[in-house]
């Protein structure tokens, strides 16, 4: 059941230091967003969120078109309430880009042409009147690009470690808004010497309700652990974290980053919305893949 209070829904999981403002002027929002950017020049954690109340439709359109000057941000809204996630630094964009690039390289190695490995950045989706959301990057297979642009099968959401509870709410939101058409949400938590990845997906419709830790361990032990390929209405959905990988810098020159929790697997059928053809397999991101992908990021 949809939360009747959009402000409550969008504030769920936000850190204590979140900023809440009733909209007055775009200039005032720019100042708040710049202050967050300035904070992250000297810190690797903290609040990156602004809740904005009392938004008019024309202001929502402006914010959706990225009208906060040089501030890089992601935007979502429900009715007259908006939520701005300020993207604080290069490593955040880099972490999103590197993960996307790694997945693409795996697909190309299978013989899939690059134009059939389409990422569409922070595209805004509007599932209902008065609602909209963008992620940090989205993967939409070719079968969902034509004749109309459909839901992504894979979404990446990136933030600082204090943002993880909210990012988990956003993962559930992608599943709910798409009726399960979104198959995976990758959450990336960025700190100066550590990167943390979570892969979220839906449990099968016949899974125990509610899911227990033992149920989740059993699901994660399946090979492959493919999420449901048929649509699921939100009341039936049970999102869970199916994979966690933590990468830590050793701080020693010449030594690879320490990786715990790999591999992370993206079953092909769920990613491409079709069965794999010859030479096509599940996307397996190994320990070495995570070490190589994060090498430069953890030096910045």
Image (cartoon, grey):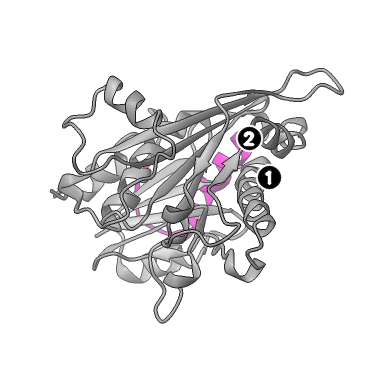
Nearest the camera: 85 or 205? 205
- Residue 165 located left or right of residue 7: right
Q: Residue 90 carries which label?
A: 1
The residue shown at (16%, 32%) is 209
Residue 192 lies in the magenta stretch: no
Assign a secondary structure to mark 1: helix
How many C-alpha atoms fall within 10 Å of the one at disc 1: few (<14), some, or many (≥20)? few
Query: Are dots 2 and 1 in contact, CB under 8 Å?
Result: no
Q: Which of marks 2 and 1 is in front?
A: 2
Assign a secondary structure to mark 2: loop
Q: Residue 286 carries which label?
A: 2
Q: In this view, does 166 lie above or below 157?
A: above
- Residue 3 located left or right of residue 41: left
Q: Earlier in the sequence, mark 2 or mark 1?
A: 1
Percent of width and height locating residue 218:
33, 26
- Residue 263 located left or right of residue 11: right
Percent of width and height locating residue 103:
61, 50
The residue stretch that appears in magenta:
20-40
Predominant SS along the magenta part: helix
The residue shown at (49%, 65%) is 141
């Amino acid at each position: 059941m949809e939360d009747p209070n959009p402000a409550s829904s969008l504030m769920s999981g936000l850190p204590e230091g979140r900023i809440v403002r009733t909209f007055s002027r775009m200039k005032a929002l720019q100042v708040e967003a710049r202050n967050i950017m300035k904070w992250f020049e000297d810190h690797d954690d903290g609040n990156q969120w602004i809740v904005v109340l009392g938004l008019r439709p024309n202001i929502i359109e402006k914010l959706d078109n990225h009208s906060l000057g040089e501030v890089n941000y992601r935007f979502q809204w429900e009715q007259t309430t908006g939520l701005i996630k300020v993207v604080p630094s290069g490593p955040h964009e880099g972490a999103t880009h590197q993960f996307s690039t790694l997945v693409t390289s795996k697909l190309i190695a299978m013989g899939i042409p690059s134009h059939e490995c389409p990422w569409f950045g922070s595209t805004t989706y509007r599932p209902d009147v008065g609602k909209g959301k963008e992620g940090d990057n989205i993967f939409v297979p070719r079968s969902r690009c034509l004749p109309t642009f459909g839901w992504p099968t894979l979404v990446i959401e990136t933030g600082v470690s204090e943002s993880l509870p909210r990012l988990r709410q956003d993962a559930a939101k992608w599943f709910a808004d798409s009726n399960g058409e979104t198959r995976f949400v990758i959450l990336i938590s960025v700190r100066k010497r550590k990167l943390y990845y979570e892969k979220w997906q839906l449990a099968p419709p016949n899974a125990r309700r509610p899911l227990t830790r033992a149920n989740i361990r059993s699901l994660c032990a399946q090979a492959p652990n493919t999420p449901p390929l048929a649509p699921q209405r939100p009341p039936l959905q049970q999102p869970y974290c199916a994979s966690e990988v933590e990468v830590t810098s050793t701080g020693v020159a010449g030594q690879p980053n320490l990786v715990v929790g790999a591999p992370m697997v993206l079953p092909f059928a769920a990613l491409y919305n079709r069965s794999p053809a010859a030479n096509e397999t599940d996307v397996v991101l190994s320990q070495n893949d995570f070490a190589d992908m994060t090498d430069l990021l953890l030096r910045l």
